């Protein structure tokens, strides 16, 4: 048997309107359960088995929502903030009834892949230190990044507070003037970790973008500040090896 949920809650949670609007819709006979008009929002239905329609259209119950965002600079990875816009402020009305939060944090000046969901258990699993979920970043670094840095990152960089980072994979890309483009994969998520790793190596990150989380890559067709629901394949890539 599936989850039992009050009919008025299901309707308003699926974005059909407020609880009081749903009360009216029910009163006017606009809601059917398995083909029969139901007028009480208090009735509980089985979200998996019962077919609910509102004005003739099926209402599909989704408990969890998974969005992939290309986070822009200037917004905070939080649900609320007194001074800045948050990533949740960028989410449209149609998703607002889910109680969404970002999975982990990107700095205000970091761009890129951010998962936004209301699934606390998955979030916990993706962020749990013992899961070592890999995260890959593209960065522009002031200074010349060399093979010596690759070796140091693969052995484990020591941060300013004495923390010894887990081995990280550093690849060197294009070098222009005094700036080097790199791709770095880390297996943990300390505060400002990528910037601090490069600081320990005597270099400064001037641009940072997350491009991958676990096996899920950022879809380059998602513009900065835009988002969409994850596909099933993308959900599987995100959660590969994480849920068991
Ligand atoms: N490392 C950082 O320094 N900043 C981020 O936003 C993410 C990883």
Image (cartoon, rainbow, N blue to C red):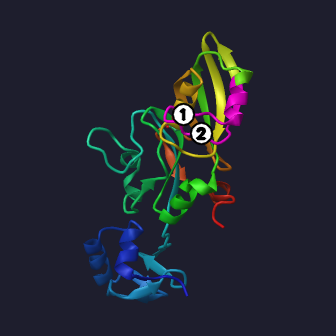
Residue located 37% across and 55% down the image = 93
**Residue 137 marker:** none
Image position of 142 with respect to 191: above or below: above
Which stretch appears magenta? 149-172
Image quarter in which the C terminus is found: bottom right
Furthest residue toward front: 162
Q: Nearer the viewer, residue 237 or 157?
A: 157
Image position of 228 with respect to 75: above or below: below
Left or right: 243 with respect to 20?
right
List x then y, in percent, for residue 231.
62, 57
Look at the numbered disc 2 and give the secondary structure of its residue: loop
Which residue is tagged 2? 164
Say if the magenta span includes residue 1.
Answer: no
Image quarter in which the N terminus is found: bottom right
Residue located 65% across and 50% down the image = 214
**Residue 159 marker:** 1
Q: Nearer the viewer, residue 69 or 78?
A: 78
List x then y, in percent, for residue 239.
64, 58
Residue located 52% across and 30% down the image = 195
């Amino acid at each position: 048997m599936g989850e039992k949920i009050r009919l008025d809650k299901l309707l308003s949670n699926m974005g059909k309107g407020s609880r009081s609007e749903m009360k009216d819709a029910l009163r006017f006979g606009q809601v059917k359960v398995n083909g029969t008009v139901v007028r009480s929002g208090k009735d509980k239905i089985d979200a998996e088995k019962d077919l609910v329609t509102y004005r003739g259209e099926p209402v599909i119950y989704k408990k969890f929502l998974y969005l992939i965002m290309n986070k822009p600079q200037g917004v905070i990875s939080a649900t609320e903030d007194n001074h800045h816009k948050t990533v949740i402020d960028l989410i449209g009305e149609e998703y607002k009834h889910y109680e969404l939060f970002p999975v982990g944090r990107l700095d205000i000046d970091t761009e890129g892949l951010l998962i936004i969901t209301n699934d606390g258990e998955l979030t916990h699993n993706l962020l749990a230190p013992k899961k070592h979920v890999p995260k890959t970043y593209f960065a522009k670094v002031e200074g010349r990044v060399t093979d010596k840095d690759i070796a140091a990152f693969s052995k484990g960089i020591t941060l300013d507070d004495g923390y010894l980072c887990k081995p990280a994979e550093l690849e060197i890309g294009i070098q222009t003037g005094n700036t080097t483009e790199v791709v770095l994969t880390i297996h943990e998520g300390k505060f400002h970790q990528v910037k601090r790793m490069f600081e320990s190596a005597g270099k400064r990150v001037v641009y940072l973008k997350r491009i991958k989380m676990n096996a899920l890559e950022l879809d380059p067709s998602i513009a900065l500040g835009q988002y969409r629901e994850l596909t099933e394949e993308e959900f599987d890539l995100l959660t590969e090896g994480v849920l068991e």
